[in-house]
Image (spheres, rainbow, N blue to C red):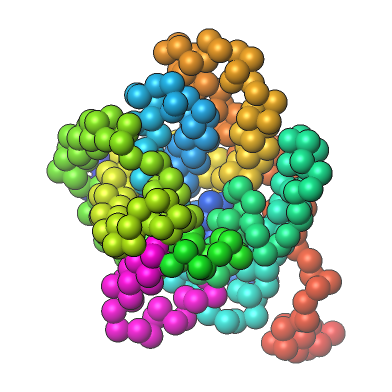
Amino acid sequence: MTNSLRSHDHRRAPLPPQAPQSPADGVPSPSSAASASDPAPAKQRDAFFDNAKYLAIVLVAMGHAWQPLTDHSRAAEALYMVVYTFHMPAFIIISGYFSRSFDMRADRLQRLITGIAVPYVLFEVAYSLFKRYADDDPSHPISLLDPWYLTWFLIALFVWRLTTPLWKVVRWPIPLALGIAALASVSPDIGDDLDLQRVLQFLPFFVVGLFMKPAHFQFMRRREVRALSVPVMACALGLAYWVGPYMSSAWFYHRDSAQELGAPWWAGVVMTFALFGCSMLLTACFFSWVPRRKMWFTVLGAGTLYGYLLHGFLAKGSRFWEWYDVHAWVYQPLGELFVTFVAAVVVTVLCAPPVQRMFRFAMEPKMVWAFKRDATELARSRGKG
């Protein structure tokens, strides 16, 4: 990782153990605002994870740009399905990995509120207002219980993080999480509150991340794994190209039960385990090709939450204002490449430090006024006085 700045031999640069409360705490983006009890977190940044988050957010933006093309291009549909198999699982696994040390300590709960809950509230309101006026839908409700569009990830991360201590005490956490996901996939009565279908169906990836170690990421960086990832990805693309016309991409969203997708209940169980296996395999392939050393885009890994939430306005706006229909040439091969390039550039700009500074009030508010001061900190300040 950062040690590989001195050497390009990845075998000499094993992934270092992470600090208990790394600045990459929480994904898609780390919070740069640390509490007083977390000394100098910025010096502990790990280039591998920032690189992984940036590359994954670029794939997220590309996937959203490809979605209108999937009805017109079988190749775009295949790419879309493959990317949706692993880009959110990759984010969620990293989220779980950096949640390993989470407990109910006051400063960590404060960071959970300011770094996840507050942005959720602000962007849920902002997205709802945007839909009302941009889509000419004045009846669209503003509801914090029914996440709209991208905000589901924030509420999911909030719930997963709170459950972290529970997963540490159960004997078989990953099988249990998979069982919960399978049950959710056959339970159409769960409803839309807090987007619980996604919270429960994506849960196994968070739990996997909780129990991963640096050695697991080091294993995925082995030369043999990188070599094997190429034919695996090629086979995945070929399979997606073949089954694309016969399979609904809604399975990859994990937001509906099998019955809601028009399938028998047992298909939910089968697809839960099948997609989990495929997602883990392709996520390992993705991680195997993430650079370990510091790259030009490494600094953008600190702003992926900004890119994630802000690009959603453009992604949805392109549908509301029918940009794809107005410019029909985008459905041609060169147009598809252009759309892909624009999506990558836009999300890159939205992850940049100037954008982070502009929107930090919403993404990383300090809100010192909202919390009681820690007893230890109060005693220390009195002693200095």
Direction from residue 114 to residue 351 in the image, left or right: left
Q: In the visual, does 88 lie left or right of 178?
A: right
* Residue at the image position 45 percent from the left and 42 percent from the top: 56
52 and 65: which one is in front?
Answer: 65
Residue found 64% across the figure and 28% down from its top: 318
Segment colored magenta: 161-186
Q: Is residue 139 above or below residue 334?
A: below
Residue 350 among those drawn in magenta: no
Quadrant assignment, res 229: top left
* Residue at screen point 28% across, 29% down: 241
The quadrant of the rendering that contains the C terminus is: bottom right
Q: Can residue 14 be seen in this view?
A: no
Residue 40 or residue 169, whichever sits in front: 169
Quarter residue 42 falls in: bottom right
Compared to residue 165, the image places residue 36 above or below, namely: above
Left or right of 126 on screen, residue 76: left
Residue 55: give x, y in percent of width and height: 45, 39
Residue positioned 75% across, 49% down in the render: 140
* x and y, in percent, of residue 196 in the image: 53, 65
Label tally: 0
Q: Does the magenta stretch include residue 164?
A: yes
Task: Give coordinates of residue 209: x percent, y percent.
Answer: 38, 63
Examine the image and state in which quarter residue 309 appears.
Answer: top right
Residue 221 visible at all: yes
Majority secondary structure of the magenta segment?
A: helix
- What x and y, as percent, mark residue 374? 72, 83
